[in-house]
Image (cartoon, rainbow, N blue to C red):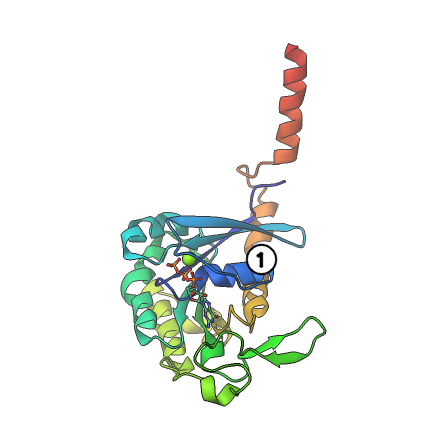
């Protein structure tokens, strides 16, 4: 096993669904979560590359750890909840400055999660046989037998335009030229960890975008990259000599 080639960090207010997004992508399911304490690390093998994805805690008490997690990151996913305007504004007020420690070439994605609650398309779940089915099992106030998609959709508090505008402000904050950076339309996503809507698309898009950084690092023969398999082998050999 090799050291991760590149680091991706997910940031955002508590309860926006950061951990759920990572579960959906890495384990292909939506499961119960408890509020993250500190941070957690996922390693994703993507083709021949190893990508470390760092989940962070949105709770205020862990705020101080955020810039440490962002250190050297090649991509940062700034996550909000589409039904909660405050969660978008927190990204700018509280989380953006944490990314000052990221790699200078870091790319930024803005992700509005819980789209299943507001968007009829995101409400659909892809079944194992490839058919789309309505996700109605988790709406306690609307029994599955009597509900329809339109009757359970909530008011969307954050418009996609608001996310695009935030992306442009992030570029200004970073001193980046708009025409030399990935386009806002490409970097703003709406997802549902619950139904899986756009989740693979988000991560795969980001991985493809950080690929040049991975290749550059590998070509430079990054001295800090450790081949763990090889080093284990070496240790075993040494142990053998001592016996
Ligand atoms: N409807 C819906 N609920 C979601 C979605 N993603 C997460 N949730 C729910 O939102 C709540 C919070 O999800 P988490 O993934 O724990 O949120 P988090 O951002 O990791 O929160 P912290 O760890 O406290 O920062 C849980 O009850 C999830 O089940 C989603 O896409 N749709
Ligand atoms: Mg979490």
Is residue 42 positioned above or below 191 on the image? Answer: above
Circle 1 packing at 10 Å, graded few (<14), some (14-19), many (20+), is some
Is label 1 within 8 A of ligand 1 (CB to nearest ligand atom)? Answer: no
Placement of the N terminus among the 4 image quadrants: top right
Q: Residue 3, how many percent across, how many down?
A: 57, 41
Residue under the point 35% across and 62% down: 14
Does residue 170 appear left or right of residue 228 in this picture?
Answer: left
The answer to whether residue 107 of the structure is visible from this angle is: no
How many numbered dots are placed on residues in this image?
1
The residue identified by callout 1 is: 26
Placement of the C terminus among the 4 image quadrants: top right
Residue under the point 64% across and 79% down: 132
Residue under the point 66% across and 31% down: 230
Farthest-out residue, top: 243
Is residue 77 positioned above or below 186 on the image? Answer: above
SS for dot 1: helix
Does residue 93 appear left or right of residue 112 in this picture?
Answer: left
Q: Residue 100, how many percent across, how many down?
A: 34, 55
Q: Quadrant of residue 173?
A: bottom left
The answer to whether residue 167 of the structure is visible from this angle is: yes
Q: Quadrant of residue 134?
A: bottom right
Q: Residue 2, how many percent across, how many down?
A: 61, 41
Q: Nearer the viewer, residue 242 or 154?
A: 154
Is residue 190 positioned above or below 7 on the image? Answer: below
Farthest-out residue, right: 129
């Amino acid at each position: 096993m090799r050291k991760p080639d590149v680091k991706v960090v997910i940031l955002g207010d508590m309860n926006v669904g950061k951990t759920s997004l990572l579960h959906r992508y890495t384990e292909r399911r939506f499961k119960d979560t408890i509020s993250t304490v500190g941070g957690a690390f996922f390693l994703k093998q993507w083709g021949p590359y190893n990508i470390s994805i760092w989940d962070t805690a949105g709770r205020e008490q862990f705020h101080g750890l955020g810039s440490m997690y962002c250190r050297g990151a090649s991509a940062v996913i700034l996550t909000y909840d589409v039904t909660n305007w405050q969660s978008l504004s927190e990204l700018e007020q509280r989380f953006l400055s944490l990314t000052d420690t990221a790699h200078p070439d870091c790319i930024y994605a803005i992700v509005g999660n819980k789209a299943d609650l507001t968007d009829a398309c995101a409400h659909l779940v892809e079944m194992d046989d490839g058919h789309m089915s309505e996700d109605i099992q988790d709406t306690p106030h609307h029994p599955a037998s009597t509900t329809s998609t339109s009757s359970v959709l909530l008011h969307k508090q954050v418009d996609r335009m608001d996310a695009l505008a935030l992306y442009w402000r992030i570029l200004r904050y970073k001193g980046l030229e708009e025409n030399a950076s990935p386009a806002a339309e490409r970097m703003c996503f709406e997802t549902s960890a619950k139904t899986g809507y756009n989740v693979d698309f988000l991560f795969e898009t980001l991985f493809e975008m950080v690929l040049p950084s991975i290749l550059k690092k590998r070509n430079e023969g990054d001295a800090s990259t450790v081949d763990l398999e090889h080093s284990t082998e070496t240790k075993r050999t040494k142990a053998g000599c001592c016996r």
